[in-house]
Structure formats: structure tokens, C-alpha cells
Amino acid sequence: MKEKEFISTIKQILGSEYIGDDCAYLKDLGIVITQDSLVEGVHFKKNLITPYQLGYKSVMVNISDVSASGAKPAYLTISISLPSNIETDFIEQFYLGCQKACNNDVKIVGGDITSADKIYISVCAIGTTENRNISSRKSAKIGQKVIVSGIHGSSGAGLKLLLSGKKEPEKFIKSHLEPQAQTEFGKYLGENVKELYAAMDTSDGLMDALSTIANESGVLLDIDFEKIPYDKEITQFQNWQDLILFGGEDYQIVATVPQDINIGTTIGEVKQGLGVNLKINNNYIFYDKQMVEKSIYNHFSN
């Protein structure tokens, strides 16, 4: 997958200790910082999302990364590039959506506006780390349990509906267009887990998060599919199990934590080995890094 290859190359060239997690933890400044971009035609289609929803989602996906780190989301800057035919109403609705996602807890403190051939959005988010234990993909430990927040697969189901021109069930479409970052879940982890722990959001899918944590930490995650929470109506979709594992953009949190941490749903354990061992339909399927990367969304596939 080129995206991960590019990140690996950049990390090697820069020799940076900060590149690798979704948020860079700048301990000397007491902050985490992250940046995500949304590009028309790659991450969204203008005819399938309103300007309000686009603003909301652009902010929420960054708040999600900060929350998964265990930090408190605090500040954002937003840069947006727009075609010349965009009207003021688009900007008004876009920023109303951004404001709604911030929910008086996060402040938008700046950004940039430029012209372009299509819509490009880049959001930088900063979180504060005071009295929080910050996670890392590299910190899963043998003996910890694997937990998740929320339900999985709903956003992928919503995208399927949108692309097929369907509007029902509306709850799946809403899950895709108006995701909710798991700020309270992240807060609990940051304030209550005292040892090293791993955590990621599921922006690229549940299996991607599991595989990334496993491979970055050098461990095996033993997962029971039957324990993964999901909306039972998702079973109406063809290949519904793949939506749960690989659908992406649910923006839930996956974490490996001590056994005494009481939050979320336990779906497995951290064991000796490397990769993800999935129990599904009374069989075991082993996923190595290459298998997972072939199955998830590739931004550079077109």
C-alpha cells in the first residue's frame, strides 16, 4: 500500500521519533498534534455530502485522532482550497458544521483559504496532555486485553447505501456522514490507564487498527469476531462481516489495556507472536501485515 510505504520512507529520511502514531506527542510542550486532509473525489463526493456535513466530518476525524491518543482535544486550524465557482453559502454552512463538531469544547484558532481546481481541506488539531497518559501504537503488552468502543461497520454500510443511491436505513448513512469521535472513551483511558498502552481510532477500519497495533508493538492480537459489537441490521448487506472488519470511518477506538480497566467491549487478548489471529465462524484466520494492507482502502489506487 503506497500510503504506508510513503510514510515509512518519510520517517526514514527525517529520522523523526514523532512520526508513526496518528498524533505526535510533544512531551516538552505538553501537547499532541495531528493533521488530516480530505480531498474531493478521494475522500468525499460533493453530491453525496452537504457543506455542513463536510465541515462537521473534517473536524470530527481530527478530534478522533486526538481522543484516541488519550489527550484532550483543544485547538484546531483549518485550511481549505476551493474552486472559483464556490459561493459564500458553502463557506457559511461548512463552518457551521465545523462549529457543531467542536461543541464549545474545541476552539478554531486559524487556518488558510486558497483557490484550487477542486475542494481540498486540511485540519490540524492540538490536544493537551496534562494529567493524561498518552497512548502509542507501539505500546501493546502481552497479557493486556483488547477493547473497543461503540459498534463497527455502520459507516461502511452507509457508504454502500450512498453509492447505490439508497437512503435507508438512514442510521447507517448518518454514521458515515456524521461520525462521532469517542472523546469520553479516550478521556477515560488517558486518565485511568497508568501503564503503557496502545490505542488507535478505526478511521481505516477495525482490522487496520488491530494489525497496525500488533505489528508496531511486535505482538499477536487474538480476536473473537463474535465479541465485536455491531448493529444487527448490518447483516442484510452482502459481505457484512467484511464491512465490520474493513469498512472504515467508524471512528471508534481500539485499545490494549490492563485487565482491570472497565470500559468498552473486550474482543480479545494480547499474546506472544506477530499479527492478528481472528476466530470467525468457528475457524481461525491469521492476518499478517500484507494481507490486511491489501484489503483496506488505498488512497493511491486510482
Image (cartoon, rainbow, N blue to C red):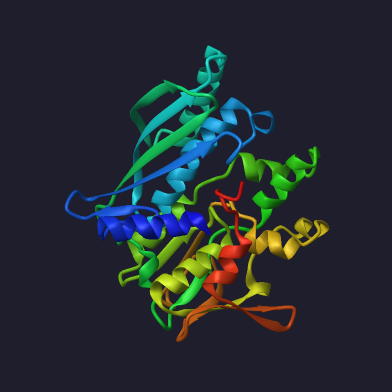
In the image, taking residue 30 as reference, residue 151 lies left or right, namely right
Q: Residue at x 37, y 58 (%)?
A: 9
Q: Quadrant of residue 166?
A: top right
Residue 123 is situated, as x and y percent measured from the top left of the image, at 41, 37
Residue projecting furthest to the left: 28
Q: Residue at x 53, y 15 (%)?
A: 84
Q: Quadrant of residue 51?
A: top right
In the image, taking residue 205 as reference, residue 187 lies left or right, namely left
Q: Tell me, yes or no, if residue 107 can be seen here.
A: yes
Q: Residue at x 70, y 45 (%)?
A: 159
Residue 102 is situated, as x and y percent measured from the top left of the image, at 44, 35
Q: Nearer the viewer, residue 184 or 4?
A: 4
Residue 5 is situated, as x and y percent measured from the top left of the image, at 45, 59
Is residue 238 shown above or below 91? below
Q: Residue at x 63, y 63 (%)?
A: 295
Residue 43 is situated, as x and y percent measured from the top left of the image, at 58, 41
Count of marks placed on residues = 0
